[in-house]
Image: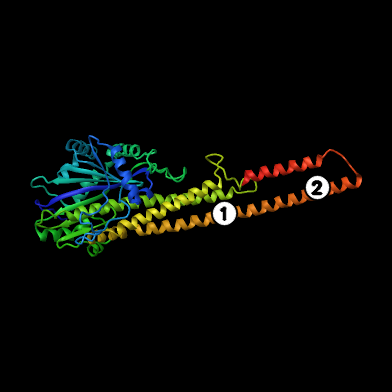
Amino acid sequence: MFVLPEDVRIRFALNGPIRTNLFLDPRKLIDQKRRERLFPELEKNLGRDGKWQWACCPDGQRTSGLDRDTDTRRGTTIKPPYVVESLITDEDYLEEIKQTLLKQAGESVTEKIGEVSLQKIRVHFFDFGYATFWADFHLSRKPASQLTLDGLREGIEALAGNIKEIGPIFDLMRVQLESAASLPDHEDGDLIKGPTSEKIRMKDTGVTWVHRVFGLQFSDPRALSEACDNISDLIFTSSQEDLHRDRESVHEHSHIYVSTGNSASLFSSADEEGAWCSFSTLSEMIQMQNAFFAAAEDLEDDLFLMTSNVSLGKDRISEKTGLLRRKKSQENKGIDDFSRDIVVLLEEGILFKSAFLDYGNHLNPQETEIWKRLGKRWGTEDKFAHIDEKSDSLRVVYDRIITIIDQKKSEFLNKFALGFTLMGGISVVVDVTSVIYDLRWPSAVSIFSLFIAALIYYRVSQRM
């Protein structure tokens, strides 16, 4: 059991995704000229709040005019990584939030780990129905206190377990953004995009999970090495050997460990200005990975549910109802409704994956290493592979429906042609009989024939 030195400096962050169910049109964010028109209007509508400040995502362009920084090699993404940021820095409000968390967690948290201070809360809202929060804390040790890595982990986890208590803050932010993003009179149209289907995306809004990020700065390199040897007390993993092999850092005396619930940056540095860069970088990468991973899970569920709905729709195709093209009710969708939902959902999947790759391809070397390691630990690439598989399954089921529809059309048109052929034959018989017997009866047969033709035309128009 490793006891942390008294002079160790400790920070930690609570970091997690928030399901907002607020979907914005990503196509309007990709086009830079349209974005330059929409963002000023969005910022104006957001205004200022006494407890937090709003800002749209910067475009990332550099004053040098270069596409990439020569030192970091980080490039500019095509689409903004997020849409807007809400930042809480008001000290009184941060203290109120901290007390809410501590009240629910109990006094044992401060007794175990010391005094905590909340420095800021940053919330990023994305276009795909999610946001992420990043709450940055500083920890002040009690003099002569015995704090172990185990105790630090347990105390922070107890605090993180009450994050739902501040969920209403995120709800208020979402409502403000939803109101501000409604731009029906704007030349580029409304920024808000509705859900793909009324039968999906029905999950509750709010924080979905919390990832704990630890930052520890040691003055003594030997203490740093000893802490790294006991890192499994802080970071859960199936193999401590894997942790040491997989630690990622491009800086000497800096070690970054990532896992599924807790991650940490442990370092020893005399450079105060850049000492916490690894902690901030790790937190940012986890924040973005949280957003993409959570949204990917929902997209995978949506694709599976859509495939099931389309498959059920296939069973409703019959001679009487199979060719309905108009939406009769919320429960009875026509083929046009299914077609639109499928196409839009598949397009969302393509744009979402493109945004994920776009962000990952523009990181600097340190960020890239952390990004790849997080993806491997969390199975993010597997998640996107599952999305591709479910997209293919949806296309297969949809193609079967189209095949059935075409078969039904062919059968019906053949019957339609046969009916007109029979009517033509009857008309010839009537005309021949009239000539032979010189009959001058009222044209009942003609009237009947017209009635039959009108009835067939009506049924066809209803089914097409």
**Residue annotated with mark 1:** 402
Residue 65 in percent (x, y) is at 23, 56
Residue 448's disc is none
Q: Nearer the viewer, residue 260 or 56?
A: 56
Residue 229 in percent (x, y) is at 18, 61
Residue at 48% in and 51% down: 342
Mark 1 or 2, which is nearer the eye?
2
Q: Which of marks 1 and 2 is nearer the N terminus?
A: 1
In-image side of 268 versus 127 (left or right): left
Which kind of residue does numbered mark 2 sit on?
Ser
Which kind of residue does numbered mark 1 sit on?
Ile
Q: How crowded is mark 1: few (under 14 residues within 10 Å), some or many (20 or more)?
A: some
Residue 137 in percent (x, y) is at 18, 45
Q: Distance between the residues labelled 1 and 2?
A: 37 Å
> Where on the picture, by quarter, is residue 84?
top left
Q: Which of 399 and 237 is in front in this view?
A: 399
SS at circle 1: helix
**Mark 2 and mark 1 in contact (Cβ < 8 Å)?**
no
In-image side of 44 versus 25 (left or right): left
Q: Which residue lies furthest to the right in this view?
A: 437
**Residue annotated with mark 2:** 427
Residue 353 in percent (x, y) is at 37, 56
Q: Which residue lies furthest to the top in this view?
A: 50
Q: Which colour scheme is used?
A: rainbow
Q: How crowded is mark 2: few (under 14 residues within 10 Å), some or many (20 or more)?
A: some
SS at circle 2: helix
In-image side of 98 versus 260 (left or right): left
Q: Nearer the viewer, residue 289 or 40?
A: 40
Image quadrant for the N terminus?
bottom left
